[in-house]
Amino acid sequence: MGDLAADLVADVVVLGHGAAGCAAAIEAHDAGARVVLVDKMAAGLEGGSTRVSGGAWWEPSSAERAAVYLRSLCGERRVPEPVIAAWAEECTRTTAWMRDTVGAEVGAVPGTLDRGIAGTVVEIPPEFPELEGSDAVTGWRAVGGALGRSRLLTALTEALARRDITVLLGTRAERLVQDADGTVVGVQVTDADGTRRTLPAAGGVVLATGGFEGDAGMVRDYLRFPDTLTWGSPYNTGDGHRMAQKAGADLWHMDNMTSIEGFRVPGFESGFYTRFSFRKGFLYVDGDGRRCVDELPRTGHGQGLVHGAYEHVPVRSLHAVFDEETRLAGPVSPTAAMLPVGWNVLVEGYEWSWDNSVEVEKGWLHKADTLEELAPLIGVDPELLVASVARYNAACAAGFDEQFGREPSTLVALGDGPYYAFTSAPMVAWSNGGPRRNEHAEVLDPFGETIPGLYAAGGVSTTYSWCKDGGMHIADALAFGRIAGRRASARALGA
C-alpha cells in the first residue's frame, strides 16, 4: 500500500474538486485544519459536473418553508427529519457564505430559458407550484448573477488558491484506509505518474466524488437504462460509491436521478441536450413508428406530472420527427448563448448551427423528402409513421390531443417535406443516490451507525429521494460540503 506520505500531512482529505469538495475544503481550512484536496482529473477537466452546471443555487425564503417544500418533494420517499432540518438551515446561509467567505460577486439570476420560447427572460417560479412549501422558492442566485460558463467553479478554485490549500489533480483515489476499529484514517491514491501512496487524514475523508452517471454498469443496475448518456462530466463513474461500500456504507435512493432528452453523437463522450425551443412542430415515435407519449409534459428537474403522478421523464429511447419549418426555426440543441451548460458545450466547445444545417450535413440528423423515405433511416414502419403524423396533425387542427393530452398551445402540425429525425435517448444529468449519511454528513452503515472519519456531500450522496427544484443540486452540494468540512475539522482538532 505504500508508506504514509510524510510530505503531505493532512487533518482532512477531500476527494473531489466540485462544489461540495471545494466547500468542504474551504470550511475545514478556515476552521484550522490542514487540508488536501484530490481530484482524479487533470487541470481543465477537474470539478466534475460543477464545471458544466448552471452553477446556480436556490434561495429559500426561510428554513421553515424550505423544510416543508423538501418534505413535499420527497413525498412517500421520506428523508430523515434531522437531515431535512440541516439542509434547510444551511441552504439559507449559502448566498452569504459565497459572498463573505468565498469572496464571489453574487447576484440574482433574472431569468432563464422560457419553456416555450428560448431566450425569453422570465421570473423563475417553483417547478412544483402545487406542492406545499413551494412558496419557499424566491429564485436562483449565482456568481455574477448569470448561469453557467463555470463561474461557480472558478470562484471556488480562486478561494482555494487564496488559502494555499494543497490540491492534487490527476490523482485517483482508490481505497479508503481504515484502522482495526473501522475508523477511516486515510485514503490510498495513485498519482498521475502511477505512484501509489497513502494520504493520512486524522479528521477523516470527505467523499465529494460526484455521481455514477458515467458508469454504464451502475446506470443499468440502479437506474434501469440499458444505454446511458451523460450531460455533465462523463468521468463521474461512482468511485466514491465503491470506496464507501468497501468501508461498510449503506446506500440510499439509488434509483433516483435527473434525466433529460439527449442524443448520442460519434466522437463525443457525453450527449447533446435536445430541446425544440423555437417551434414545436415535432413528435416522438417508438421503434415501430407509433406516436406513444405526450412530448411536452410539465416537468421539473427530472420528474414530470404523468397521469396524475410524478414520474421520471424521459425513460426510453424514441425517434424525434420534425419538419423543414421547425428545422429552420432554431437549433434543436441549445447553443452556449442560449444555455451555457453541459459538457459538450463548455468543455468540448461545440457550437450547434442555428438552422441545424451543419448537423444534417454531418449525418447526425436524418433527412428525407417524404415520411416514407424517412422511416427506414430510423428503422420504423413507413405506414405507421405516416399514420402517426396524420393523426398528430389532426389533433393540431382540432386543438386537442385525445391520445396523450399534450398542451394545446404546443400542438404545431408538421408541414410539407423535407422531414428530419434523430433518435432521442434519456440523458442522465445527475444521479442522486449514494452512501447514506446523516445531518452531520457522516456516512452510515446498514445498521444506522456512523463510520467514523467518513463524510459525504454533493452528487455522491444527495439529499433528494425523489423530486427537486432548480438550483437545488448546487445548494445541496454547498450546504453539506460545508457541514462535512466543519465536522471533519472539528474531529481532527478535538473541538
Image: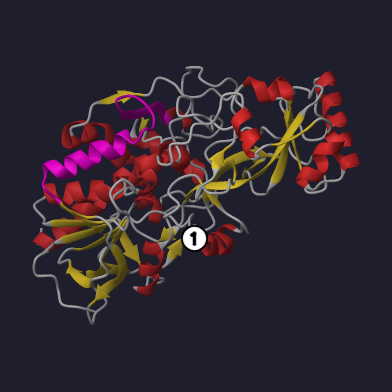
Tell me: residue 315, above or below residue 223: above
The quadrant in which the N terminus is found is bottom left
The x, y position of residue 343, in whole percent, is 44, 42
The quadrant in which the C terminus is found is bottom left
Is 139 covered by the magenta stretch?
yes
Q: Which residues are magenta?
A: 136-165
* Viewer-closest of 69 and 216: 216
Tell me: residue 340, above or below residue 192: above
State the residue lying farthest toward the top: 121
* Viewer-closest of 55 and 216: 216
Occupied quadrant, residue 163: top left
| Residue that numbered label 1 is attached to | 215
The x, y position of residue 214, in whole percent, is 48, 56
* Viewer-closest of 42 and 174: 42
Which type of secondary structure does the marked residue at label 1 adopt? loop
User: Callout 1, which amino acid?
Assistant: Asp
State the residue lying farthest toward the bottom: 180
Q: Residue at x 33, y 63 (%)?
A: 443
* Viewer-closest of 62 and 407: 407
Is 480 covered by the magenta stretch?
no
Q: Residue at x 57, y 54 (%)?
A: 228
The x, y position of residue 98, in whole percent, is 23, 34
The x, y position of residue 367, in whole percent, is 74, 34
